[in-house]
Image: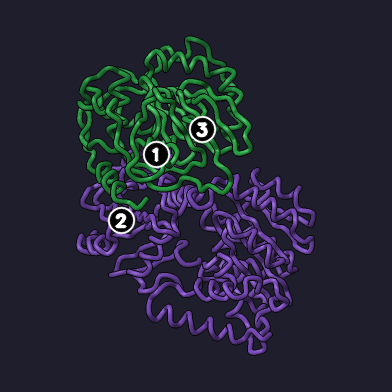
Amino acid sequence: MNLFFLKTFTQITIKIIKLFKLGNGYTFPGYFILKFFPNILSSKTFNYKKGIILISGTNGKTTTSKLVTDILKGNGFKVAHNASGSNLLRGIVTCLFLDLNFFGKPSSDIAVLEVDEFALPQVLDNLTPKVLVLLNLSRDQLDRYGETDTILSRWINSLQNLSTKTTLVLDATQPVLSILKDIFKGTTESFNSFAPHGIHVKEAFNIKNVNASLKVCSLYKLNLENCKNIINNFQYAYGRGEQIVYKDIPFTIYLAKNPASFTNNLETLIDTPTFNSLLFILNDNIPDGRDVSWIYDVDTDLLKTFYNKVGVSSENIFISGTRCYDLASRLSYAGFEISKDNVNKDLKKTLNLIESKKLKNSSFAVLPNYSAMLAFRKLTLGRSIL
Amino acid sequence: MKLNITYIYPENLNLYGDTGNVEILKYRAQKRDISVNITTIGIKDLINKNTFKNTDIIFMGGGPDSGQKDIYKDLIKNKASYLKDYIENGGCGLFICGSYQLLGNYYRTADGSSLEGAHIFDLYTEQPDDNAPRCIGNTVAKLSSTILEDPYFKNNNYIGDLIVGFENHGGRTYLAEDSVPFAEIIKGFGNNAQDGYEGIHHKNAIGTYFHGPILSKNPHIADYLISKSLGIEKLQKLDDYLITSAHNTALRLRS
């Protein structure tokens, strides 16, 4: 069967969804295709010449998959990549269908796909990757994913049945992941947290993402110097250290969607305090998880250190999002002085307030969770994702 | 004035930011110029009849299944009897989710086997069969009259009769006939998704499924524990604007 017609369907649907602003568009076509062809990904159609690389874990998926994609592209490969961040099975289906050529075959040499950690077993049931990168596992959205143990046992089940054609790449420094090495029957390669030679990595937590990418490069026997050059010129994925100037005010976005990423960002900002104003945004929409108790898993002493080190006055701290008061309470319990007037659920009103205050030479660090990051981009750039 | 908090198994039982409860008690006490001393007790720490002598509030959090397994033997064998004495003698305590279940009479798993509890709270918990959904979501409940009528609560309550939180549990808990619930569920599942009860209020100890952490948006419960445990009739009122707003936001959330 030539699946090209489904590609056309996918393209048109995405255009319509974007036109009517019904969503990012990358989820629905895949959802629809799976409804009629539930096992479509297992078909021979998706045999990539250079294989499929899957990247999963709680944090760093988007950055690492963009790193790997940029490196491969820089080495002359044609790459299919779910850059929109749609990382459930349906998003992956959408991405792979968009890559089909007129003959119903993949037009790229290789697919680099970030995969949601909960959806990973389902994806592995359908696709056999050449490389599977597992970055880390930590607390995220307990209401949706369950405990970290639940995810780990799902991964263990999958890896027991995974083809030995796959090479597993994982973080050797995470005790929670070390068990996977023994369970998987094929080859396992590890990466660590040592700063790589000849590469300048701005944020400490990105070292592991870079090392994971370098490990993948070595599996493809790419020229290391060339890869390092590409990494040194790397542009971060949207919302990850991304800079946006809005109404002459510079904002840098640091996606803070769970305790680990919130902590990583605080540590980065403590090391390089290049801002004098803060905007926190906390939502409890479906993609975020309905529960916000995780903000209390961010270490109080770290918050105190952050607050004392950056020395931002209460007049320059703004809090927004559907659960702004939860976050404002949490920060005040950690010793932050919060001005009531700077706490507002409505992000648009908060941005108007920031603009009206005419803070002198202000530069903002923005710490939003996932849907909050999209909302912030939408208001400041006019688009939420790509 | 000094508030002594004993936090049992912080390494193993701390899910949903439950540790935040201890930090909130500390913060709210210190704002009233009450100094705070936090003692932690882990699996390896031996305790005796004097361990809780100076304790004003005992706290235990919820935990993942693995964390509960790790502490189970030690709790039942080495700590339960001292904990029971403390609570029977009127000591204040707050026990969340997994530890609330463990302090009951027993926990029956889906395959029918029974796990002995600490027999401190007169209740039992059953794990329903695998098809039964977990009880997950935002919660609102009305406090039971045993708390509402307590002068220590009344004198320090500026926020109302309701509590808010977030629950996520598979087990269904059933109180014995003489046991008093902590609250009655308005939104959410509570103890077992059937009888409308939430938690237990036994002597001066509270067992509950509410996370959030529970004290983060229920300052009246935090202040109740502080005032009751120290015998202070009226605590100095704090500026709780942000916290009250978070409480009110939670009242309106979908369950």
Q: Name the residue under label 1.
A: B213
Q: Are marks 1 and 3 on the same chain?
A: yes
Q: Is residue A213 left or right of residue A183?
A: left
Among the 4 quarters of the image, the one containing residue B229: top left
| Numbered label tally | 3
Q: Name the residue under label 2.
A: A320
Secondary structure beneath dot 1 equals loop
Q: Which residue is drawn at 31% across and 47% down?
A: B250
Q: Nearer the viewer, mark 3 or mark 2?
A: 3
Q: Which of marks 1 and 3 is nearer the N terminus?
A: 3
Residue A17 visible in image: yes
Q: Residue B125 carries which label?
A: 3
Q: What residue type is labelled 2?
A: Ser
Secondary structure beneath dot 3 equals strand
Q: Where is residue B42 in the image (x, y as percent from the top left)?
A: 55, 25
The vertical placement of B101 against A180, above or below, is: above
The vertical placement of B49 against B101, above or below, is: above
Disc 1 sits on a residue from what chain? B
Q: In this view, does B231 lie to the left or right of A29?
A: left
Chain A's shade in the image?
A: purple
Q: Which mark is residue A377?
A: none
Q: Distance between the residues labelled 1 and 2?
A: 20 Å
The vertical placement of A337 against A208, above or below, is: above
Residue A71 visible in image: no
Chain B's shade in the image?
A: green
